[in-house]
Image (tube, coloured by chain):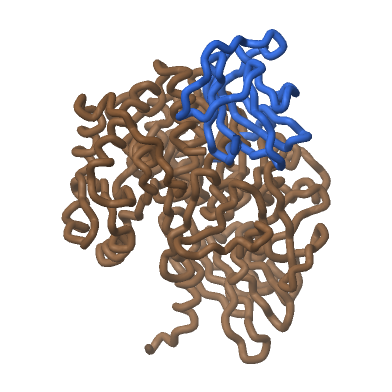
Chain colours: A brown, B blue
Amino acid sequence: MQISLLLEMVAESFPDRPMLSGPQGAIEGGEVLARARAGAAWLAKQPGETLVFCGLNGPTLPIALFAGAMAGMPFAPVNYRLADADLRKLLARTAPSVAIVDADMLSRVEGVEGVTFVAREAFDAACVDPANRDVDLAPSEQDIAVLLFTSGTTGEPKAAVLRHGNLSSYVVSTVEFLGAEEGEAALISVPPYHIAGISAILTGIYGGRRLVYLAAFTPDAWVDTALAEHVTHAMVVPTMLGRILDVLDKRAITLPELRALSYGGGRMPLPVIERSLGLMPQVDYVNAYGLTETSSTVAVLGPDDHREAIASQDPAVRARLGSVGRPLPSLELEIRCPDGKVLPAGQSGEIHVRGEQVAGEYLHKKVLADDGWFATNDAGYLDEGGYLFVEGRLDDVIVRGGENISPGEIEDVLREHPRVRDVAVLGLPDDQWGERVAAVLVCDGEQPSVAELADWVKARLRSTKTPESWDFRSELPYNDTGKLLRRVLKTELTTPAAA
Amino acid sequence: MELKPGSRWKSAVCTTEVVIVRPPKTPVSLECGGHPMVALADAAPEGLELSPDFSAGTSVGKRYFDEAASIEVLGSKAGKGSLGVDGRPLNLKEAKALPASD
């Protein structure tokens, strides 16, 4: 099923309902569809097989996504924050392609061979040009909808392939068609080149929720837009929420119209969620876990799960606040050990998923097993109630003397120390143990002693999980979607300072 | 009729259109209003009438399924006819509402 059909169904049902909001005001569903069709008619006349998008968030993004689908062109949003040389290298991989580029970014990318560059304003103009309207479009046979370059925290970016069937299956099986109440509006602040930026378009539109675009995230602009646009729903990555709460505190306001806040894309520190709950108790919190390769969400911790966990005296139920909830009913999820055996509840292993939304495919390389299972490369376990706990990338698990140690568990404990603002735990090569546990900390106020911190961990976990080396910094390295760059820290800590 | 996933079909007697979400395990006749549906791009046969047994209507955005054939379709355009396979009416799939996570 082509993703453009999702837009058609909504636009034909409610052509006059506002669908997209940006700095220039709101665009109604019927007009969004007309613009996407005109964009497709225009694209059909351009050279190139792939449609690249290199620019800030805004209504042009969803229109381009659907125009590309209708024109039979896979849509490839790229990270404009990359260094010029890396961005050009990525663009070269999309050739032959047409690239819609923000005017002020054109000079950074022009001249890449095989790529036809179009300024964003020129594409916007083509979408409202009467000459491109009412053009009959041939149905598309292309089954690749989106190419997303993974963030490359573990090396050269890979182009993940998401087929129309994967994305529409995810939308149709998880979202009620036009199920949103009138007036609901979702604030989109995850960047266009992130899977959540793509899935937000599809699930928001299919559910009948107006999409409000923030060009690029700053906590002040996020709060301003949420207030001005009467935003009811939003998705944030962990690093965003803390900064948003700081702004609300500073201005001594809350967001009374906000009903639902979902978070994902990394580990959310418990203190941040508790702080948010305290400030805005009316909000429904949703934690989602998913990957680019799975068309977004595969497990959800819903609002009722949050409330139940907070209210519970049972430590096992309370702990679920740190879980990503239960797998979606439309897919299967298993925890397996390295030899492939499925592990029972409570035992940690690699998370595997199977379902129609699971693409598990890179350009020219399918990584799904023959029976459809996808190995996520994430470590985790299920509890007795079927709640999934994600412990981080499998590569990040520390193997110390044969014992598997999850960095996340130690980070959580250290983060509860009143002086610790941020922390990263990682494994460093060790002659005796294979790997040893290392902690890198950002502290507030007077730096606690190493002995005090070590005792703090030892009292709550066990001694093998107590870091053996300690490093203090003013900040930790994150990429722009809030992923901690452990690889960078590891390289820094294993490279002799003199080198 | 080859009911491939993602393929689109229209009713021969009303405005209903559907898209195949899950194809059947074995070949079946997909019907609307009591008559076989037609591939979206093809011309519908003329002179057919809506069967009263299949006139409860099809809604846009609803999923319909038949357990025995293991088929699931999504209504993409509403119409007066209701859906069936091999003369059996399709059932409405109750949507499991999940909290918005994107």
Q: Residue furthest bottom?
A: A431
Horizontal arrangement in the rendering, residue A11 relative to residue A165 (left or right): left
In percent of width and height, residue A491 lies at 46, 78
Image quarter (top left, top right, bottom left or bottom right) of the C terminus of chain A: bottom left
For the point 28% across and 57% down, the residue is A96
Give the camera-side residue of A495 and A192. A192
Specify the quadrant of the image occupied by residue A402. Answer: bottom right
- Residue A477 visible, this angle: no
For the point 63% across and 76% down, the residue is A437
Horizontal arrangement in the rendering, residue A167 relative to residue A135 (left or right): right
In percent of width and height, residue A470 lies at 56, 76
For the point 39% across and 46% down, the residue is A192
For the point 55% across and 47% down, the residue is A296
Q: Is residue B19 above or below residue A152?
A: above
- Residue A162 visible, this angle: yes
Horizontal arrangement in the rendering, residue A270 relative to residue A386 (left or right): left
